[in-house]
Image: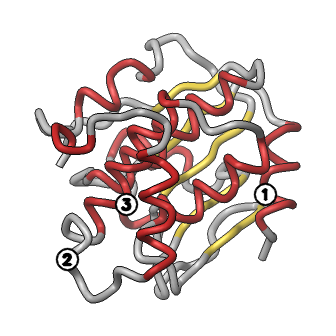
């Protein structure tokens, strides 16, 4: 398993990145993917999200600006908040053995990537993505909004028992970028 610093270093070495989200995409997988995509673009990388046919009107606004064009050919593939390849949407199944970096928070994570980082004690994968993105550079509002969505989704707007003091500190740091959390919640 990689450390946060090792995962960030690996991402710095990537270009032409395709980011995968799980079936029935929720705010955590979409928020993680969108925040990571924004961060990779901020450091000069080409990055997109693989279109996900299960998007809802709640998650689509965070996803759509980063959706890959039909002719995009990735050099690297990253998965966010996916515990097992069995959770890949149908259009992602061809990438099952091509994931260069898998980022997850589930205790059931199967370690299917060529490189993997998991934080099972995290309330949301967004907490781990946040730490990786801080290693890559400044967290911008374009990154903070989807990361807030990720963390607030998997904590039930900070009401679930998985919410920790660290989760609240992370939310506060994201809020300090100037987002309208009341509209997001």
Residue at 80% x, 70% y is 2
What is the crowding at mark 1: few (fewer than 14 residues within 10 Å), some, or many (at least 20)?
many
Q: Which mark is residue 7?
A: 1
* Disc nearest the viewer among 3 and 2: 2
Q: Residue 159 carries which label?
A: 2
| Left or right of 90 in this view: 3 | right
Q: Quadrant of residue 161?
A: bottom left
| Left or right of 22 in this view: 82 | right
**Residue contact between numbered discs 1 and 2, judged by CB atoms under 8 Å:** no
Residue 28: percent from left, percent from top: 36, 56
Q: Is 95 placed above or below 45 here?
A: below
**Residue contact between numbered discs 3 and 1, judged by CB atoms under 8 Å:** no
Q: Residue 151 carries which label?
A: 3
What is the crowding at mark 2: few (fewer than 14 residues within 10 Å), some, or many (at least 20)?
few
As measured in the structure, the alpha-carbon distance from the residue carrying label 3 to the one carrying label 1 is 20 Å
Residue at 39% x, 45% y is 31
Quadrant assignment for the N terminus: bottom right
Residue at 36% x, 54% y is 150
* Disc nearest the viewer among 3 and 1: 3
Residue furthest left as drawn = 57
The tag earlier along the polypeptide, 3 or 2, is: 3
- The residue lying toward the viewer, choosing from 81 and 129, is 129
The tag earlier along the polypeptide, 1 or 2, is: 1
Residue 55: percent from left, percent from top: 20, 38
Q: What element carries label 1?
A: helix
């Amino acid at each position: 398993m990689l450390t946060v610093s090792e995962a960030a270093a690996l991402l710095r070495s990537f270009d032409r990145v395709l980011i995968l989200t799980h079936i029935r995409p929720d705010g955590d997988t979409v928020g993680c993917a969108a925040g990571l995509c924004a961060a990779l673009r901020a450091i000069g990388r080409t990055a997109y999200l693989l279109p996900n046919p299960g998007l809802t009107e709640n998650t689509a606004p965070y996803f759509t600006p980063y959706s890959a064009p039909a002719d995009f050919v990735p050099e690297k593939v990253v998965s966010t908040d996916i515990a097992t390849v069995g959770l890949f949407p149908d259009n992602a199944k061809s990438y099952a053995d091509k994931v260069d970096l898998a980022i997850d928070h589930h205790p059931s994570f199967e370690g299917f990537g060529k490189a993997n980082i998991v934080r099972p004690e995290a309330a949301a994968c967004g907490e781990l993505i946040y730490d990786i993105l801080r290693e890559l550079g400044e967290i911008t509002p374009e990154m903070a909004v989807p990361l807030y969505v990720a963390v607030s989704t998997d904590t039930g707007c900070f009401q679930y028992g998985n919410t920790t003091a660290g989760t609240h500190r992370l939310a506060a740091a994201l809020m300090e970028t100037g987002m309208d959390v009341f509209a997001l919640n």
